[in-house]
Amino acid sequence: MPRKRERTTTKASWTVETLENAVKKIQRDGTSVYKVSIETGIPYSTLKKRFRLAKVNDASYRRPPKLGRPSVFTEEQELILANHLHTMSKKFYGLTRAQFCKVSYAMAERFGVADRFNEIKKSAGRDFLTGFFQRHPDLSIRKPEATSINRILGFNKAEVDQFFENLEKVMTKYHFPPSQIYNMDETGVTTVQDTKKIIAPRGQKRIGAVTSWERGKNVTTICAMSASGSFIPPLFIFPRQRHSPQLEKDGPPGEKK
């Protein structure tokens, strides 16, 4: 019986420079592909295939090593998808995973490779989605912040230019010092604590955790800082129609209204 060939090489452990030197050695010295494979660590089948491409002057033999099945799209085609995701996210219409899989299938139909996807659901699969994010680490699944249409429509080039024009007029007219220029931002704070995941018996239908209210309200918190680096105490806007003096306890000094 013929002796079983020992596996002495590792897939994708070689470089393009190593491959070029191996091909040159085979062409120049007439060394066998098997012997050069053992010396360089390039798998025999890979070196044999690349050497055949080099003999017909096919520059594709210099492709870097890559494991696994080839991707559905080329790098240029995937870049189109990635740029589309960036654009839609900036326009406040980011795609969900399901929507992106549908778009990917439509693009695959355009380039004639839709047979690699599920033609019944007309959608790309989970494996493609996972591989796409691995190849494009600048993209990830994130939870967007709810933004109203009015805020989106109000934030445009014309409105921003008008704001800075008015700001320049006011600053030129009154010459405000840095201590009188404040930047203010607001956020919402819920009155109900967020419950965390807990360990509980299997089969129990309802799992509860103690909190102040089951349904809370948002309290608006305002913080401001001047251009000189001074802060003012945070302001809280409570959703109450009847103001209670208890809400002013230990608050900042000054006139109460």
Image (spheres, rainbow, N blue to C red):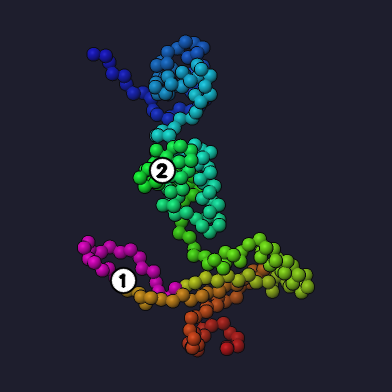
How many angstroms separate mark 2 from mark 1 (CA)? 39 Å
Query: On the image, numbered disc 2 is attached to which residue?
Result: 128
Q: Which residues are magenta?
A: 190-209
The dominant secondary structure in magenta is loop
Identify whether 99 is placed above or below 77. Answer: below
Residue occupying image coordinates x 49% and y 65%: 146
Residue 245: x, y in percent?
50, 89
Q: Is residue 59 left or right of residue 99?
A: right
The kind of secondary structure element at disc 1 is loop
Q: The N terminus appears in which quarter of the rendering? A: top left
Residue 77: x, y in percent?
51, 40
Question: From the viewer's perspective, is the residue at label 2 or at label 1 nearer?
Answer: 2
Residue occupying image coordinates x 51% and y 17%: 56
Q: Earlier in the sequence, mark 2 or mark 1?
A: 2
Amino acid under disc 2: Phe
Q: Is residue 201 left or right of residue 24?
A: left
Residue 242: x, y in percent?
49, 88
Mark 2, Cα crowd under 10 Å, few <14 / some 14-19 / many 20+, is: some
- Residue furthest toward the left? 203
Find residue 255 and name its label. Answer: none
Residue 68 versus residue 82: which sits nearer the camera? 82
Residue 50 versus residue 182: which sits nearer the camera? 50
Evaluate whether residue 21 shows in this view: no
Find residue 209 and name its label. Answer: 1
Residue 187: x, y in percent?
52, 70
Queried whether the magenta region covers residue 56, the answer comes back as no
Amino acid under disc 1: Ala
Mark 1, Cα crowd under 10 Å, few <14 / some 14-19 / many 20+, is: few
